[in-house]
Structures are given as structure tokens and as C-alpha cells.
Image (cartoon, grey):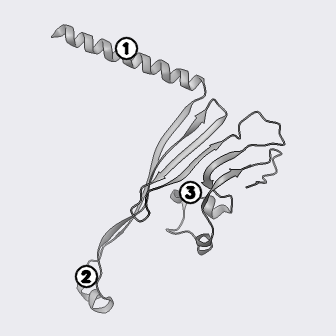
Amino acid sequence: MNRYRLGASYRRRRIYCILSCIMRALVLLGFLLKLGGQAQNDTTGFANAEVLETELGRLENGVQWRRARIYAEGTLAHYLDFKFMYDFAANNPPHLKDAFLDFSKLPLPIFLGGVRTGRFKNPLGIELATSGTDLTFMERGLVSAFLPTRNTGAAMPRDGAGSGRSVF
């Protein structure tokens, strides 16, 4: 029994050493990965429901998920950035929010800038560019309801000359 414990411990240390070496090699090659998620919900509860129901009709307590997202973003080979975000919220059918590759760090001539391809947020103003976790109010403004939040395509997020212009 004692030899088995030593053997299992040795195998665990060996696996840890191999995984550690692989992770260090990936970092040296420029591979970085960040996993995360977002969750936001609305909750409604009525304490004195009988009085309100006579005035307003039937009232129900409830919970609704606004956002339930997981994402993976990172860098490959120091030059290629990527992001994949999937939304599982109950009020929307599950769908892919973001899936893009960003070539903005490639050593290209300064006039080319960078290129982003895939499905990503449109560069149409500060309100749509702000993350849902950083909103001051619960909802975005009315104007954003008429604009598409994400599209599939290619964009040059900057022109390389530092002017801040974008081409979508």
C-alpha cells in the first residue's frame, strides 16, 4: 500500500511537471488565454400583493436572466488576438455574441493599421461600445434600440497613423 501511494504521488508530480512545462512554452510562444463570464438578472417581488392586485390586476414574483455569458479571449503568437462569447440567457435563444480574430498587432506598414474579422461590436458610438457590466443604468438609451449591436464582417479599427479613424 505504501509503494502505491509513492507511485501515485510520483505520477502526480510528473504530470504537474509536464503540464507546467507546456504552459511555460505556450507563454513563451505568446499564447495567453482568459476565460470568464457575465451574469445579470432581474428579480421582482411583491410583499402586499392583495392590495395591489385589486388595483392593477394579477402580479407575479419572478426572476429573469438578462445576460448569462461565457467567453474566452486571448493572444496567439504575440500578434493575433481572438475572442469568443456565447450567450445562454433565457429571454434570448442561445447564440454566439462575439467571434473574431484581430490582426492589429501584426508588423505591417503603418498605413495599413490592423484588421479585425468575424462577428463583433459595431463602432457606432460610445453607448454601444460600453460593456453591459459597465452601464450606469439598467437599460441602454432608446437610440441604441434602432442600431445593430453586432455584425459579421471585417474592419480596420484604426488607420495606423494615430488619427483614431475606423473603416467598417
The amino acid pointed to by label 3 is Ser
Q: Is residue 164 left or right of residue 136?
A: right
Whether 126 is drawn above or below 78: the answer is: below
* Location of mark 3 (residue): 131
The local crowd at label 2, few if under 14, some if 14 to 19, many if 20 or more residues have their Cα within 10 Å, is: few
Please tell me whether mark 1 or mark 3 is closer to you in this view: 1
Relative image position of residue 32 (x, y in whole percent): 55, 33
* Location of mark 1 (residue): 14
Secondary structure at numbered mark 2:
loop
Relative image position of residue 95 (x, y in whole percent): 47, 56
Q: Residue furthest bottom?
A: 55
Whether 87 is drawn above or below 56: the answer is: above
Q: Quadrant of residue 124?
A: bottom right
The amino acid pointed to by label 2 is Asn
Q: Earlier in the sequence, mark 3 or mark 2?
A: 2
Secondary structure at numbered mark 3:
loop
Q: Quadrant of the N terminus?
A: top left
The local crowd at label 1, few if under 14, some if 14 to 19, many if 20 or more residues have their Cα within 10 Å, is: few
Q: Quadrant of residue 144?
A: bottom right
Q: Earlier in the sequence, mark 1 or mark 3?
A: 1
Q: Is residue 111 left or right of residue 52?
A: right
The amino acid pointed to by label 1 is Arg
Q: Using the image as rendered, state which of residue 54 and residue 148 is in the foreground.
A: 148
Relative image position of residue 125 (x, y in whole percent): 68, 63
Whether 58 is drawn above or below 75: the answer is: below
The label number, if any, that marks residue 48 in the structure image: 2
Find out whether the residues at labels 1 and 2 contact each other: C-beta distance under 8 Å: no
Distance from disc 3 to disc 2, alpha carbons, whole Å, reads: 36 Å
Relative image position of residue 168 (x, y in whole percent): 73, 55
